[in-house]
Image (cartoon, helix red, strand yellow):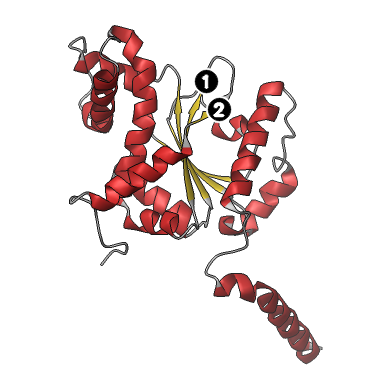
Amino acid sequence: MKTKYAITLAAALFLALSCLAPALAAGRPDKPSPEKVLQMLQAGNARFVAGKMHRINQDQARIEMANAADQGEHAFATILSCSDSRVPVELIFDTGIMDLFVVRVAGNVVRTDEAGSIEYGLAHVHTPVLVVLGHTRCGAVTAVAQEVQGHGHALERNIPPLVAPIVPAVKAAMQAHPSAKGAAIVPYAIEQNVWQAISDLFVMSPATRDLVKANKVMVVGAIYDLADGKVHWLPQDQVGRILAAAEKNPQRATEAMAK
């Protein structure tokens, strides 16, 4: 009986590995195309806004699956989002357990921790899409805009270095919209901060640049509107321009792999 069981188990293992061979040979499990993933995210947000959520992959069966499964076989998008509690990422896109690889930080900025987390999501969880998701009325961007305009206030010691990457975004917004003063600059700065995060990622992460250039990953900018729940997708051609600029930046990282 033991011999028969061992042979059966070996045969089953061989069959499973044979089925997985094409995906393993390609270095990643089968996932939808970046274009299809973007459509899935857009459709999920439309359901969220309409109050017709499917609430998929949120049941006990999915919980049990997550305990045994590899997230790399299921997650289809990496999302960089602000930590703001008003931005419930999985709900916004009507997704569930193991659907999204979410990186959250105040102001959706990119520094080492965020870049490393994103690299893991793209290269090891094999998500075909990265969404950098800003949101309206962002407190981090508002605080930096006030500081840059000379109306800031005291902050705890670790917050200023955390939000420092937002400063160039605010200054760029002020330069592009010189007539916008005070709080009026914030919406422009929020959008510019999405572009700044993408730029910082491209400069810091050769691995991300390589995946995008190989058409294995699509990077998308978006802004979530707190007022109505809609995700507004930013122009995709701007990502290409940012990537081209990063490739020419003398300060860009050039080694994709850690030594």
Callout 1 crowding tier (Cα within 10 Å): few <14, some 14–19, many ≥20: some
Q: Which mark is residue 212?
A: none
The answer to whether residue 173 of the structure is visible from this angle is yes
Name which quarter of the figure residue 58 lies in.
top right
* Residue at 40%, 41% in the rendered image: 239
Residue 6 at x, y = what percent?
73, 86
Q: Which mark is residue 231?
A: 2
Q: Which mark is residue 225?
A: 1
Q: Residue furthest bottom?
A: 3
Residue 41 at x, y = what percent?
61, 38
1 or 2: tag closer to the N-terminus: 1
Name which quarter of the figure residue 10 lies in.
bottom right
| 120 w.r.t. 82: above or below | below
- Three-letter code for the amino acid on which mark 1 is drawn: Asp
* Residue at 70%, 48% in the rendered image: 62
Name which quarter of the figure residue 240 lies in.
top left
Between 240 and 53, the one lying in front of the other is 240
Between 112 and 197, the one lying in front of the other is 197
The residues bearing labels 1 and 2 have C-alpha atoms spaced at a distance of 6 Å
Callout 2 crowding tier (Cα within 10 Å): few <14, some 14–19, many ≥20: many
The reply to whether discs 1 and 2 touch (Cβ–Cβ < 8 Å) is: yes
* Residue at 52%, 69% in the rendered image: 27
Residue 138 at x, y = what percent?
40, 20
Q: Decide if residue 31 is on the left or right side of residue 218.
A: right
- Three-letter code for the amino acid on which mark 2 is drawn: Val
